[in-house]
Image (spheres, rainbow, N blue to C red):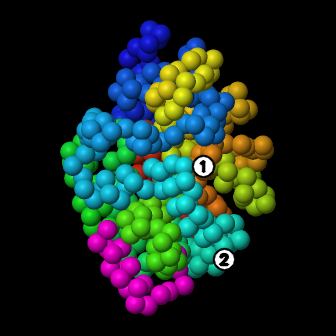
């Protein structure tokens, strides 16, 4: 494909080749004189760290600009993106914390912010440890496991469910609903994906409505009760409450699972770094940050310019859509030494995997706590961890990054 400068870039974000290793494509984009224009999404793709960070932090760059559009224009935009005729999805997903701005975003974020501060999150450590121990006990008689399906997929959902106040037994279907909803945000939205996303949102809504009815009768010490009380106090509408609960649960599933999986894969690809981390467990916090940098779990977001702007030395008019390729920015050699090397002791490591500005990831402390407990426990419990499949398949898409499966061998210490 030719970009507007006539440069050939093999940009096929839904291909298996891109899923396995997108970084050569990102590197080619970075070498262009100006950002690459992706015709498929009418978007200028930003790959350099400085450009991505500048746009992420610019308060005039918004994820949503619908408030400036007429109802006819809004419908036309949704139709172009194939995100129309989805009553539940439009009601609870397309109008969520993630897709809100300004005072509305600040008000919604305030309702749940306290639950995700470092001090409050740390109180979950014992619960995370219990869940990790129980999952590992369950596979203790197996010398070979799928690290994703048998282990990683279960930890984040149990914990975010515990925070919100949903039964642990429901974790599996909450994960499935979350995956079906999140996958539709990717490029290449098909009718089949649309049907899955709409059905998942409807079922999710019915499920949460039942729980909220229960909280109205019998309040609990959980986030769902506090959100219900916020609605009673006029701080949230009923639709905002449901959308916010969905957003918290979705955010607590996919991206953390992906980072746990890609983090383990990176350690196995760089055995010297795994050995170093075993010998120096005090490096765990920097190692976890490196896992987020090396394979950003949410490698792409977008922003709209609400004014004429200059980015990377080029001028763009108001209304321009920018693609923030966090995955590319986190491998920018202008920002990181040897960016394609996984280094558990990397410092400084000012990656941008958690986004920036008002949309900075709310659950980053909880994700890092999960990973701290997981990898410390694995290293104490197993003297050897080996990769079975040297080339595990990664999820396809521009907006996700993580292995679908990861077969490993475990030898108890």
- Per the rendered image, the range of residues in magenta is 205-223
* Residue displayed at 64% across by 33% down: 54
The reply to whether residue 403 is visible in this rendering is no
Farthest top residue in view: 6
Mark 2, Cα crowd under 10 Å, few <14 / some 14-19 / many 20+, is few
221 up-or-down from 118: above or below: below
209 inside magenta stretch: yes
The picture places residue 400, in percent across and down from the top left corner, at: 45, 45
Q: Residue 5 in the image: state x and y as whole percent.
A: 47, 10
Residue nearest the observer in this picture, 353 or 291:
353
Residue 31 coordinates in the image, percent (x, y): 58, 18
Q: At 50% across and 37% down in the image, what residue appears?
A: 303
What is the residue that sits farthest to the bottom in this orientation? 218
Residue 123: which numbered mark, if any? 2
Q: Is residue 101 visible?
A: yes
Foreground mark, 1 or 2? 1
């Amino acid at each position: 494909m030719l970009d507007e400068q006539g440069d050939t870039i093999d940009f096929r974000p839904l291909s298996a080749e891109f899923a396995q290793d997108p970084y050569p494509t990102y590197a080619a984009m970075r070498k262009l004189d100006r950002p690459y224009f992706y015709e498929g999404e009418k978007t200028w793709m930003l790959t350099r760290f400085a450009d991505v960070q500048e746009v992420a932090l610019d308060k005039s760059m918004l994820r949503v600009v619908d408030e400036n559009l007429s109802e006819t224009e809004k419908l036309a935009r949704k139709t172009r993106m194939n995100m129309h005729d989805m009553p539940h999805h439009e009601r609870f997903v397309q109008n969520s914390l993630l897709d809100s701005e300004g005072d509305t975003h600040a008000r919604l974020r305030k309702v749940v912010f306290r639950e995700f501060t470092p001090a409050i999150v740390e109180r979950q450590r014992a619960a995370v440890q219990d869940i990790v121990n129980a999952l590992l006990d369950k596979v203790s008689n197996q010398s070979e496991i799928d690290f994703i399906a048998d282990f990683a997929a279960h930890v984040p959902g149990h914990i975010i469910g515990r925070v919100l106040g949903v039964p642990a037994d429901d974790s599996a279907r909450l994960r499935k609903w979350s995956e079906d909803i999140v996958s539709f945000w990717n490029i290449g939205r098909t009718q089949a994906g649309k049907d899955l996303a709409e059905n998942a949102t409807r079922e999710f809504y019915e499920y949460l409505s039942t729980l909220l009815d229960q909280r109205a009768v019998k309040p609990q010490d959980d986030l769902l009760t506090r959100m219900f009380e916020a609605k009673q106090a006029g701080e949230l509408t009923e639709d905002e409450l449901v959308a916010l609960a969905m957003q918290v649960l979705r955010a607590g599933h996919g991206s953390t699972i992906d980072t746990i999986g890609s983090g383990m894969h990176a350690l196995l690809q760089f055995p010297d770094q795994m050995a170093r981390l075993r010998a120096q467990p005090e490096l765990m916090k920097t190692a976890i940050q490196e896992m987020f940098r090396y394979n950003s779990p949410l490698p792409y977001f977008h922003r709209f310019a609400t004014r004429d702007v200059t980015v990377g030395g080029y001028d763009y008019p108001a209304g321009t859509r920018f693609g923030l390729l966090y995955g590319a920015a986190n491998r920018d050699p202008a920002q990181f030494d040897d960016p394609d090397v996984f280094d558990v002791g990397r410092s400084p490591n000012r990656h941008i995997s958690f986004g920036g500005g008002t949309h900075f990831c709310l659950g980053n402390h909880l994700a890092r706590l999960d990973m701290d407990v997981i990898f410390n426990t694995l290293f104490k419990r197993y003297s050897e961890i080996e990769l079975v499949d040297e080339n595990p398949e990664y999820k396809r898409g521009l907006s996700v990054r993580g292995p679908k499966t990861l077969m490993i061998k475990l030898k108890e210490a």
